[in-house]
Image (tube, grey):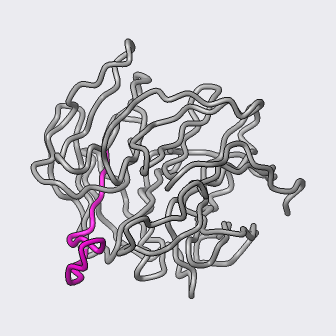
Amino acid sequence: MRMNEVRTLLGGRGLVESPRWHGDRLYVSDWTAGEVVAVDPATGHSEVIARVASLPLCTAWLPDGRMVIVSSPDGRLLRREPDGSLATYADLGRPGWNDIVIDGRGNTYVNRGDFNPMAGEEFRPGSVSLVTPDGAVRQVADDIAFPNGMAVTPDNSTLIVADSYRHSLVAFDIGADGGLSGRRVWADLGEGTPDGICVDARNAVWYADVPGRCCVRVAEGGKVLDRIDLDRGGFACALGGPDGTTLFIVAAEWRGMTESEMVTPGSGQVLATEVEVPGAGRP
């Protein structure tokens, strides 16, 4: 159960997504502003560390500590160098990419829907592609209705993908070459609509839910272990903080995919609450 109530670290933002704990700071992406922002969890002080005009705008870390950023419109992954400059890490060949996670061996997984809901296109299921450390790109999973958040278990053996349209978490075994096999439904979430996800040290997954305005912790199989209710849509969550037991949630007032502003301007927040079980795995 939760020990403390939810506190607001940062407010006044747009569509805030992709929370990531790295080193001693939290990183989030403001998709509306095209900014990757580092946040001090103690003070809430924030600074922009990268500007990329991309929607979606998700991030992950390579094992060597460099950040990789999804530049969706031009179909590239960008690598942030120590001096803050951005270099092309991989060319994905086409636009329209969404979330990203990198396992401990440097395998990069990036997913995409195969239609543009913002433009009112007809639905087609999406996929997951792998970028290996040598830069090769190949598709490794298909038929994920609407792929959103992804996470890798601490032993680098399993990739979990949130399928928002099918209200489920889907798991794959990660092979020695980074390929995926053994597809299975890790958790049927009933009416839950998972967006961003993270894994904890007891093999449970936290998922953020936009229409449900909540963040939920589930066990494999789908049993609900905890729930945090929000006053606006929950887009993603990450575990971090000094002990790994702070759950960071990014939230905003959702208007809809086809609205000119998908969230109410200025409604984006970074929230924090304390939980019992620390984070594990990636992101």
Q: Position of residue 198 (x, y in %)?
A: 57, 54
Residue at 62% across, 78% down: 212
Q: Nearer the viewer, residue 31 or 88?
A: 31
Q: Residue furthest left?
A: 93
Q: Nearer the viewer, residue 134 or 33?
A: 33
Residue at 80% across, 55% down: 6
Quarter holding the N terminus is bottom right
Relative side of 280 to 9, left or right: left
Q: Position of residue 48 (x, y in %)?
A: 49, 29
* 213 lies above or below 11: below
Relative side of 167 to 3, left or right: left
* 66 lies above or below 234: above
Quarter occupied by residue 76: top left
Q: How many marks?
A: 0
* 98 lies above or below 166: above
Q: Residue furthest right?
A: 3
Q: Position of residue 273 (x, y in %)?
A: 78, 51
Q: Nearer the viewer, residue 138 or 31?
A: 31
User: Would residue 197 be visible to someone looking at this image?
Assistant: no
Residue at 76% across, 35% down: 243
Please give the range of residues in magenta: 108-125
User: Would residue 265 be visible to someone looking at this image?
Assistant: yes
Relative side of 277 to 25, left or right: right
Q: Is residue 214 magenta?
A: no
Q: Residue furthest bottom?
A: 190
Q: Position of residue 20 (x, y in %)?
A: 54, 41
